[in-house]
Each structure stands twice: as C-alpha cells, then as structure tokens.
Image: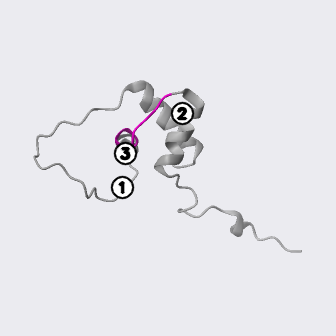
Amino acid sequence: MELNLDELDLTAAESKATYQEIKDYVLEHTGLKVGSLYIAQVKQKCGIIERENYNKPKSEDTKQPQCPPEKEKAIMEALKQFGMI
C-alpha cells in the first residue's frame, strides 16, 4: 500500500471555518457570545481577505461598534484553532 503525503494536506477551503463554527467554538470555550461583525473585524485585522459586503450602510459616517478586547482574544484563539492564522 502506498500513501502519498500530499493527499493529506488541507486545501484552502478545508482550513476555513464558517462564522457559525467560530461562534460555537468561542461560546463553548469562553462562554462569550460573539457576532459576525466582531469576527469580520478580527479577520480583517489579521489580513484575512473577506468578500465585499453586500449590505452596506446608506451613509458613509455610520458608526460600527468595535470588538471588545476579551472577545477579540477569544476570536483570535478560535481562528488559530481552525488554522486560519
């Protein structure tokens, strides 16, 4: 039997976690509930490219809540766990 190690490598798609998977991981390990906005902000800080948002605000000066440090840390841990950073 021959085993090719190249077949065991993860593809880019397989190493990406969904937002729901990240939310579930953070809730299970820290008890914190995080929203998609916070996950997107942390991913952007890490340089993970997101597709363009189709639900843009109507005005340019709309303020968005910023991710609190404890939630940012929890999301970073989840991204590391899923091999995204």
Q: Is residue 3 magenta?
A: no
Which residue is the site of mark 3?
40
In space, the residues marked 1 and 2 are separated at their CA atoms by 23 Å
Image x and y of residue 42, in percent: 39, 40
Residue 48 shows in the view: yes
In space, the residues marked 3 and 2 are separated at their CA atoms by 17 Å
Q: Are marks 1 and 2 in contact (CB under 8 Å)?
A: no
Q: Which mark is residue 72?
A: none
Vertically, is 82 above or below 76? below
Q: What element does badge 3 sit on?
A: helix
Nearer the observer, 9 or 81? 81
Which residue is the site of mark 2?
27
In space, the residues marked 1 and 3 are separated at their CA atoms by 8 Å
Which residue is painted at 10% across and 46% down in the image? 59
The mark lying in front, picked from 3 and 2, is 2
Residue 28, picture quadrant:
top right
Nearer the observer, 35 or 48? 35
What is the three-letter code of the residue carrying label 3?
Ala
Give the mark, 3 or 2, whose residue is nearer the N terminus.
Answer: 2
Which residue is painted at 54% across and 27% down in the image? 31
